[in-house]
Each structure stands twice: as C-alpha cells, then as structure tokens.
Image (tube, rainbow, N blue to C red):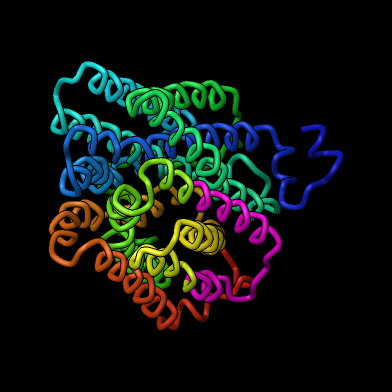
Amino acid sequence: MRVINRLALPGTGCLREQSFRLLFMSQLLSAVGDTIAAVAVPFAIIALGGGAADIGLVLGARALPLVLFLLVGGVWADRLSRRTVMIASDAVRAVCQAAFAAILIAGVGGVAAIAGIMFAYGAAEAFFRPALSGAIPQSVSPERLQEAYGLIAMTPAVGMMLGGVLGGTAVALISPAGAIAIDAATFVLAIALLAGARFRPVALAASGRSFLGDLRDGWDAFRRRSWLVVAVIGESFYALLVMPAIFVAGPLVAEQYLGGASAWAVVVSCFGVGFVTGGVIVARLRPRHPLVLAYAITVPFIGIFVAMAFPAPLAVIAVAAWVGGSVIVISGSLLETTITRQVAPALRARVGSFRALGSQVCQPIGYALVGGLIAGIGLGGMMWLAAAAVLANVALVLGTPSVRAMDSSAPGLV
C-alpha cells in the first residue's frame, strides 16, 4: 500500500481504504481460484470420457441453484451482516471444491457426483452474489465508488491472467484434481481476509418483517426501473447462448483445433488482460449517458466468437479475447455504478438478487441445450449464435427510451 500511496496510481485511491482493500484482495484470490477451476473442470470431464452434454450438465448443475435461491439470498443479505453471509458462502464453496478434488482423485462417483457438488456450490454462490453487491458501497467512500467497481470488475481480470496460466500448468503437470484443490485453498484464504474487514454500517431491512414482504419491496424497487428490467432481459440472451458458448464450446474448440488445455489457458489469460485494460479505462470515464456507452461499447465482444467460429489461429483468438474482456468490464462497471446510484442501500441486495435471477434463469437451460446445439450445428454454429445474442442484447437495450434517457447527473437513491 505504501507504493500505491506514493505513486498515486490512477483509479486505485479506493485501495487506501482498508475495508475495501481486504474485500478486493479476497475477491482477487477467489477470482484466481475460479479461473483455475474454470480451466480444469471441462478437461476433468473430458478426461472422464465426457463430452459437451456432460460438461453442460455439470455447469448447469452449478447454475440452477442460482435461479432457485438468489431471491432468498438477496433477502437475507439485506437482513444480516453481508460480511458474515460472504464468509459462510466461501466456507461452503471451499468444502465443495475439496470434495470435487477428492472424487477425482479417488475415481468414484463420476459426472453425477460432480454435478451434485456443483449444485451445492451454486447454492452458496446464490447467497454470496447479492451480499457482495450490497457490501461494496459499505466498504468505500461514495466519491470512490466507481473506482471501486472498476477494481472489483478487474479481479476476474487478474484472476484470468494468473489463474489461466496456473490452471493450464496445474492440469498439465499435476491433474485437474490438483487444480481444483488449489481453488479450494483460495476460498480459505479469502475467508481470512474478509474476517479482517469492517464494513460501514447501513440501515438493513427490518428483520421483524415477513420474508414475502421484504421480497415484495425488492420486486417493486426492481420493476419500477424499466431501464434495469430491459437490461436484465438482454442479459438473459447471454445466459442462454453466450455463456455456454464460452465455457462449453470454447474448451472443445481448444481441444479439437488449438492444442488443448494450454491453448485455452492462453485465451482465458487474454480475457484477463482485457479485464485489466477495461478497469483502467473505466476509472477515468464520466459519461453523461452511462447506459448508452455501457451497451454500445460491447459490440466488439462478438470478435471472440467470430474468431472461434472459423477457427482462427490462436493469436487472433487471443487478441479478440483481450478486446472482448476490455469492453465487458467497461460495460459492467458503468451498469453497476448506475444501479448503486439509483437504488437505496437497504434495497440493493434484493434488487441485485432480482437482477441476478433474471439474468441467470436461462443459464441452466442454455447448458442443458448446448450439447444438442453443438451436435446439430457444430462448434462454429454455436459461436455464430453467441455473436447474434450479443448484438440482440445491444439492440434491445439501446432501443429502450429509459436507457437512453438515463443521465448521470440525475438524482439517485430512489
């Protein structure tokens, strides 16, 4: 921290605040572990003799509980200490990944057991996501909020850069099981960091109210914001087609055409470089119409899918991943900052849970369908579908008047 204070690096002032610094470091560690696991899991399934449908089953088993439990997680994250909720979620996920690694080492259970573990992992994640959404503004001063979101958005970035290399190396030199065990260890370290954070108190939802009453308040706050509703509808396109294209079809492209796990690790790492690039850029942006910029800038994201559809040489795919990662971080940070400025603190986790539910509800469906889609239209066809989904999202959101009317100078916390 002394180095950061001395150099006054742009966009890092929020790291001077201890609670945010600990939160950032915990997320950075988790992001490294998540990327290691993201590289390892598809190749673990392939090593067990599985194909696209099996990979989709495992990833769908993780995504389904997000749909089932996000609203519950949102209510409790607005009632309880958000730090406590995050620590408990990390503890459950550490156990899940340790069990996953043990199953691979023992050679028992197969895909069905792995899917069950991933279901438990996803249930814990359903509580973590709304809690994190509400905790970020509690950990940093208001004037540094956009910086904070930019840096949090960069944690997957650095995670992808480091985790991609570590994941590919661990899979090649140790085993997929060893890589997943490393992910379990990162959750333990993240818990230790969160335990030292002291978030600023805010008025939480009254615990004496009924669960359904709290849920109804969150729904009312969500549906009144038409710009957010349409953004979530657009995100469902990503859940249905874009995420399965990246996490199922992408590793299969690498396995068949690019050289396997090491090549996919390069692509994932370049996404991470792009996330860092986007995080640096977004810290300097002050757009008058943040949502217009947030969606218009995502058009170049289609490049990664076009490059993998052919497929292009690894170097071309890597550059496309770098560009795609950059624009996605800029877009996501602008959207998150807008949501935070427009939603009162006591409602943020519940509004965030409705948003996450809407954007996640199609993901299990996408993972369930991806095997059949690839069998029918091939890996290239799957990539073209993903590119079309990105463009449909942009057209839908930018075609909405309330999105274009959103002005950064407008009053917030309504």
Identify the residue at horizontal 61%, vertical 37% (top origin): 200
Any part of residue 223 in sight: no
Region of the chain picked out in magenta, as a range? 269-298
For the question of whether residue 17 can be seen, the reply is yes
Q: Choose between 51 and 112: the one closer to the eye.
A: 51
Please tell me whether residue 277 belongs to the stretch shown in magenta.
Answer: yes
At x 18%, y 45%, the residue is 51
Residue extending farthest right = 6
Q: Nearer the viewer, residue 46 or 394?
A: 46
The x, y position of residue 187, in whole percent, is: 45, 26
Name the one closer to the observer, 88 or 225: 88
User: Could you tell me residue 377's position as x and y percent?
Assistant: 18, 67
Q: As displayed, is residue 343 above or below residue 294?
A: above
Where residue 321 sits in the image (x, y, percent)?
Answer: 49, 58
Q: Residue at x 44, y 39 (%)?
A: 35
What residue is shown at x 41% (from left), y 83% (from top)?
A: 399
Give coordinates of residue 116: x percent, y percent.
Answer: 18, 31
Which of the 4 image quarters holds residue 370? bottom left
Quarter occupied by the N terminus: top right
The quarter of the displayed image where residue 365 is located = bottom left
> In the rendered view, does 224 fall on the left or right side of 62?
right
Q: Between 69 and 106, which is closer to the camera in this rendering?
A: 106
- Is 225 magenta? The answer is no
Image position of 131 (left or right of 51)? right
| Prevailing SS of the magenta stretch | helix
Image side of residue 3 versus residue 106, left or right: right
Looking at the picture, does residue 386 appear above or below residue 177? below
What is the tally of numbered marks visible in this picture?
Answer: 0
Describe residue 231's horizontal placement relative to residue 116 as left or right: right
Q: In the picture shown, does residue 96 fall above or below 125?
A: above
